[in-house]
Image (spheres, rainbow, N blue to C red):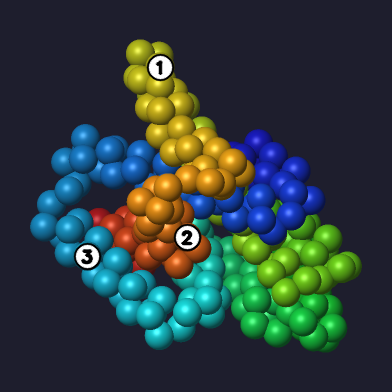
Amino acid sequence: MVLGSLFPLLLAFVGVNLMTLLLVGLGQAHFIHCYIYQYRAHKMDADFWLKLVLGLSAAAVACFYLGDDVMIPAILIFILHQFFDDLYLYKRQAGMYDYIQLGLVLCACFCLSTFGVETWARQLAALLMGMGLLVGLFAKQRNTLLTLTIPFGLPLFYVVLDYQAEDWLIPAGIIIVSHYLRWTMYIYQTRTKAQQWVFLTESLILNSIFMLYAAATVLGGHSENLSMVLQGLFSIQAFVIWTMGHIASTIRPRLLGLVKT
């Protein structure tokens, strides 16, 4: 968990374009891999398909009406997904300080993504994340500190030094890559040795999606048909739609207190 949280910080200086390419390419591989595991766990029932269709439909409508502005609510929803997914993976319950940190992260992300061109917004976002770091350190909320506050907070301080219009994608992208790595390491560590080889093989094959996207993006000059496929899979708005479908299909009512177990 520590490695999955700290390693993505190396991406703080890669730039918005490379970060977008990374999170979209790795994200597609992550979605497919999760669906494979849901299928193997016999979780692709009527409830799964209903949640998936509703998630895809809601995101498509939001993209149609909000355009590029859809990224703001999408990032906030993803942070909630990351928070609850880690609770599920590491089999723990959230405490008061966890929710305080979550609230600080959400407010900082909203502030930076909505008003980030304003100096006061950058300063406020940095202050909120500083408070989040302090809450985690003094309250010893190790899980939330590694899940959200460090992956988001440290690159945020880099962003506020020289802010550009899309720089908020840097800390948000680091959270997404951190989520991807922690899920990958968790699944790997909980498999038998034979299953670990299968998992690594699948990961290698699925992440070739990212290599295909990277090659097509860098080399350019591809056909019109390939351009249409790439837009359908990898454009930022398409990525939002696929992401919301993934998030909706993994909603676990018991984590929200909607059902008792």
Query: Closer to the camera, 10 or 215?
Result: 215
Q: Which three-letter amino acid code belongs to the residue tagged 3? A: Val
Residue at 65 percent of width and 76 percent of height: 113
Which disc is residue 53 wearing?
3
Within-10-Å neighbours for mark 2: few <14, some 14–19, many 20+: some
Gap between marks 1 and 2, in whole Å?
Answer: 32 Å
Q: Are marks 3 and 1 in contact (CB under 8 Å)?
A: no
Query: Closer to the camera, 36 or 185?
Result: 36
Position of 111 compared to 257: left or right?
right
Is tag 3's residue or tag 1's residue first in the polypeptide sequence?
3
Query: Which quadrant of the rendered structure holds the N terminus?
Result: top right
Residue beneath label 2, please? 235
Identify the element where label 2 is drawn. Answer: loop
Gap between marks 2 and 3, in whole Å?
Answer: 20 Å
Res 40 quadrant in image: top left
Discs 3/1, front: 3
Is tag 1's residue or tag 2's residue first in the polypeptide sequence?
1
Residue beneath label 1, please? 197
Q: Position of residue 199 (x, y in %)?
A: 39, 25
Gap between marks 3 and 1, in whole Å?
Answer: 32 Å
Residue at 41 percent of width and 63 percent of height: 238
Q: Are marks 1 and 2 in contact (CB under 8 Å)?
A: no
Relative height, residue 111 to residue 92 (above, below): below
Q: Which three-letter amino acid code belongs to the residue tagged 1? A: Trp
Discs 1/2, front: 2
Query: Closer to the camera, 103 or 48?
Result: 48
